[in-house]
Amino acid sequence: MGERSLIFDTTVRLVFDAAVVLSLFMLFAGHNQPGGGFVGGLVGAAAMSLRYLAGGLDELRSLLPVRPWTLLSIGLLLAAGTAATSVVTGGPMLEHAAWGAEVVALGHVSVTSALVFDTGVYLVVVGLMTTVLEALGDEVDR
Amino acid sequence: MSVLLAVPIIAPLLGAATSIGLGKSRRAQRLVGMSVLGLVLVDSAFLVWRVDTSGVLVAHAGRWRAPVGIAFVADRLSAVVLLTSALTLLAVLAFAIGEPGTEDRHVGFHPTYLILTAGVSFALLPGDLFNLFVAFEVMLMASYVLLTMGGRADQVRSGMTYVVVSLVASSLFLLALALIYAATGTVNMADLSEKIADLPPGLGRGLAVLLVVVFGIKAAVFPLFFWLPDSYPTAAAPVTAVFAGLLTKIGVYAILRTQTVVFTGDLRPGGLLLVVAAFTMVVGVLGAVAQTDMRRLLSFHIVSQIGYMIMGIGLFSVAGIAGTILFVVHQIVVKASLFLVAGLIQVRAATDRLDRLGGLAGVESVVAALFALAALSLAGVPPLSGFVGKLALVQAGAEGGAWMVVAVSLAVSLLTLFSMSKIWSAAFWGEPSEPLAPRASRVSDRRWYLMLAATAALVAASLVVSLAAGPLHRYSTRAAADLLDGSDYVGAVLR
Amino acid sequence: MTLVLAFSAAVLCGCGTWLMLDRHLSRVVVGVGLLGHGVNVVLMMAGVGGSRPAFVGGETTDFSDPLPQAMALTAIVITFGVIAFLLALAYRSWSVTGDDQVEDDIEDRRVASAPPVELDAQSADDLGGSLEGEP
């Protein structure tokens, strides 16, 4: 790593949180509007790549409480688990259920099991991107 | 009943996810891998029984109905290939656990292997071409990783060839999909079989040949096979065994599926397939005769044997396709067991160069017996399983009046026997160029017997194929009749 | 519009194929990416717009065809994953061999290192004769 650039560092700090919020928004909006787990995951992973560009692998590792392949594992479990759940209950693969409830201050909130699937995809994408950064970035840096 | 269709795809994926999480404990990973594959095996056995007694089984994912939704379909053909694949995958995983090396050293082996399993099952069950594409990609992605696991220079070199060739094939596949969709407005195979018939015949034939090229690259038929003998031998022994047994046969399965269900009547490129079949057999076996490494030699035989399967498809008769199905089942098992024997020899003698091996028959008589059974079966010596498959194919060829290709196939059988006897006399008879080290210095007894048992189980499975030849041939004939008629399949998917 | 798309697909596929024939792995990787994009453009062209929405039906008939878009998205994801793997492989090749050229395969090297075939006088004459006979 060369010397850290002040301008780039500051910009990344400014953009990072907004990008993570945007990626979460896309994850939740994906059911009825443009977005979804994959696109959300890509935006999240892009935010992480920015942090990696600014501060190197150490900064990237400090962002995540777990190793990247744990994210991959959890994501795949969630996605495949959603597909399996509907089979266990007697339906075809990937059949989804929806629940709705009135929540104080938020109004009517509806949740579908597709959200669990999408979260799985989100985690897989973020996990994959960080694995790529670890694998291809690690040795090149040193 | 959709459980039967879901388990072979979802269970390995869940297993892979768990296996990544269990990265620290190899013992737990092994337990997960073996139990998932055991589950898939039991499930596919049920699937065979179920589709044979009560017809084509269909599950619409998420209740979105075909042709727009994604359908998973099992008929007699996919069920029997799935059963054979599951058996082979299980035996090879047991071998891999025993073999010192790949599986010990790499955390990623078990997850990748399970993803490969999911890809193979997925490739056998989809009801539309696009999911067939996705399934191939899942399978290939796992195979890229398995092939280059270890990262040696020769693995990287041959892996690069393999990946780029597969990618070109995938791009062609996608191009074919785009053309098919533009022409018909659907990619569902059952729907296509009705809509392709309405197209101008020239367009229909063009699409059929394009798909033959795409799957021909995956199945390694002449002249698209050059990547195979170059890349397969560089992988670890169990990986090569599972590739040799399964991956090319999935390509053959895709040719069989698309050329029978999707394209009907005179759109089928029968003559082209017969010519390709003859060249594949001859070029493959001549390549094998020239080789001096055991695994490279066997790799050329993969190509040669693919020719027999294409020959059965090219005849487009019930007897021919029944012969192909029988032959695919036999080949998956026998090819994998031959490569496992090669792996045993590699572990025992630390080389697979034929000029350095020798005298193994006296030292390791069980290995010699296993090799002899598998090799004679490959060459088609009665009463072993290869004979059963070849007899069915030759009879079908004679019925169909394709005398040229029948003659070629018989001559190629002789050459196969010749090159198998070359391995036998070089590796098992004679004297080694340097004396063999005692077995204990190479591998512990426990590992050795596990590997031996896995290989023996596969060879025993090939014996079962020959013992149960009668019922199996009747089953294949029913499967072939279903494929050529197609109305059951179409009705079940679109109903 | 369709002509522009067809033209760009042709250019992308052509450039991709050309780059893939290069001996440098880095160019091969770029070529694979371009070819993938070209095919995706073809896939986008395959859709027929102006039909009714799938599943829900209704009176509107100006819907674009969603299926090719879904397929192209899936294909993009797959290409993305494969290119990441190819890059890792190319990097590994660079760190093992020191450059990013594709090496000759085993068969080529064997042929190159094989001792030259000794021709006896008769067959050498035949060979020479046939060579001279050519225009």
Image (cartoon, coloured by chain):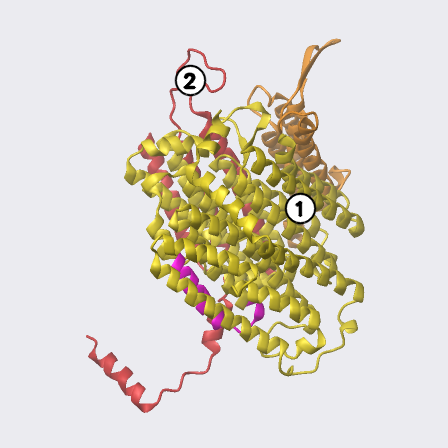
Q: Is residue B132 above or below residue B366?
A: above
What is the three-letter code of the residue carrying label 1? Leu
Q: Which residue is mark 2?
A: C52
Which of C2/A45 is in front?
Answer: C2
Q: Which mark is residue B114?
A: 1
Q: Callout 1: helix, strand or loop? A: helix
Residue B35: image x %, image y %?
A: 74, 45
Which of B179/B291 is in front?
Answer: B291
What is the three-letter code of the residue carrying label 2? Arg
Quadrant placement of the N terminus of chain B:
top right
Closest to the camera, between mark 2 and mark 1, is 1
Residue C79: image x %, image y %?
A: 52, 42
Which of B188/B75 is in front?
Answer: B75
| Hue used for the chain lettered A | orange
Q: Which mark is residue B44?
A: none
| Hue used for the chain lettered B | yellow
Residue B279 included in the magenta stretch of the image: yes
The residues colored magenta run B277-296
Residue B251 included in the magenta stretch of the image: no
Q: Are marks 2 and 1 on the same chain?
A: no
**Residue located at (65% from left, 71% from top):** B368
Q: Callout 2: helix, strand or loop? A: loop
Examine the residues drawn in magenta and state their main secondary structure. helix
What is the crowding at mark 1: few (fewer than 14 residues within 10 Å), some, or many (at least 20)?
many
Q: Is residue B244 above or below residue A82?
A: below
What is the crowding at mark 2: few (fewer than 14 residues within 10 Å), some, or many (at least 20)?
some
Which chain is assigned red?
C
Q: Is residue C100 visible?
A: no
**Residue located at (45% from left, 45% from top):** B256
The image quarter in which residue C121 lies: bottom left
Q: Is residue A78 visible?
A: yes
Q: Is residue C57 above or below residue B27?
A: above
